[in-house]
Amino acid sequence: MGALALAGAVAATAAPLASANEPLPVPFGFFSGIALEATNPGGSAPGTNDFSCTPSAAHPDPVVLVHGTAANRQTNWGVLAPVLANDGYCVFALTFGNRTDQPWPISAAGGLAPLGDSAGQLSDFVDDVLSATGASKVDLIGHSQGTTVSAYYAKFLGGDAKVSKIVSIAPLWDGSEVGPPEGVGGPDFDNATFVTELRDAGVYSDDVEYTNIVTRFDQVVVPYSSGILAASNASNIVVQDGCEQDLSDHIALVASQRTATLTLNALDPSNPREVPCTRVLPIFG
């Protein structure tokens, strides 16, 4: 889908953008995104998918949000979408790997297709974002399966030429001892082959900067250290380091104030913010 067609398709569902005087509310907690989907089926999270957005000099790279298994462009990003928009980024989010031929709410569950197909959808979406905004590169933020889709796109589909930074929240580069390999999808396939291919190729692309944000209490990525992978162009952050009261699990990790600030710092390391330490509960945040 081209940029103009995509802009028209999302016009009715694009969420309001932040202004200097009226920042968007940020309801910390994972279920804020689910509430958005329930009240606006098929919509976009606040601050996302305005294809008329012009990147600022301070933030020249638009940010593309890449959701996890069974999530979508709205349910996964109730927190990070408004945080990024309030900070002046042009923010975009897609739903990939979902059954568009099915009625809602079945159609709302994304990340249920082969990882290679999902990475192809991400590639098309990034091209639309670049065309619409005039930017030369984007930054990607992925959660769970979205980290693998982002890395696969950069490694194998030419994304390394179009991506500046990738922030991976709860990645599992070494797989997990819990359940099937990441990229868990529909009943007729799994993504073990794609994950193995990515891991064997070294995961990282030389021209992209990576940040991995993990939690010791991850119940999906076991052990959590599967998401830690050293390289000269990668930073690894355990959210409990320096904040033991943060009990974020796989779900709460993407919706906490600590993760949000760490993400802002990863995208704009020249203007670091003090990272808060607050009590975060599993699942609820």
Image (spheres, grey):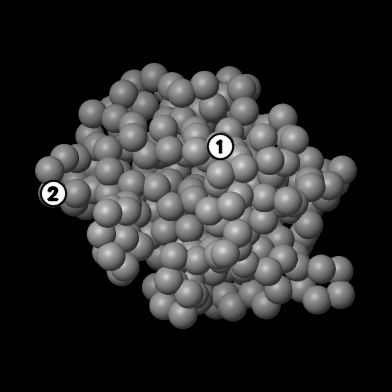
Say which residue label 1 marks. 2
Using the rendered view, name the quadrant where residue 276 is placed. bottom right
Give the residue displayed 67% in from the left and 77% down from the top.
25
Q: Position of residue 219 (x, y in %)?
A: 31, 60
Q: Position of residue 216 (x, y in %)?
A: 42, 58
Judge the density around disc 1: few (<14), some (14-19), many (≥20) Cα neighbours within 10 Å: few
Q: Quick check: can you spot residue 283?
A: yes
Q: CA distance from mark 2 to mark 1?
A: 31 Å
Q: Nearer the viewer, residue 87 or 265?
A: 87
Mark linked to residue 254:
none
Q: Nearer the viewer, residue 272 or 72?
A: 72
Give the residue displayed 77% in from the left and 60% down from the top.
87
Say which residue label 2 marks. 187
Using the rendered view, name the quadrant where residue 235 is placed. top right
Work out whether 12 lies above or below 56. below
Give the residue displayed 81% in from the left and 68% down from the top.
19
Judge the density around disc 2: few (<14), some (14-19), many (≥20) Cα neighbours within 10 Å: few
Q: Is residue 65 left or right of residue 263?
A: left
Q: Quick check: can you spot residue 260?
A: no
Name which residue type carries label 2: Pro
Describe the element under mark 2 as helix, strand or loop. loop
Name which residue type carries label 1: Gly
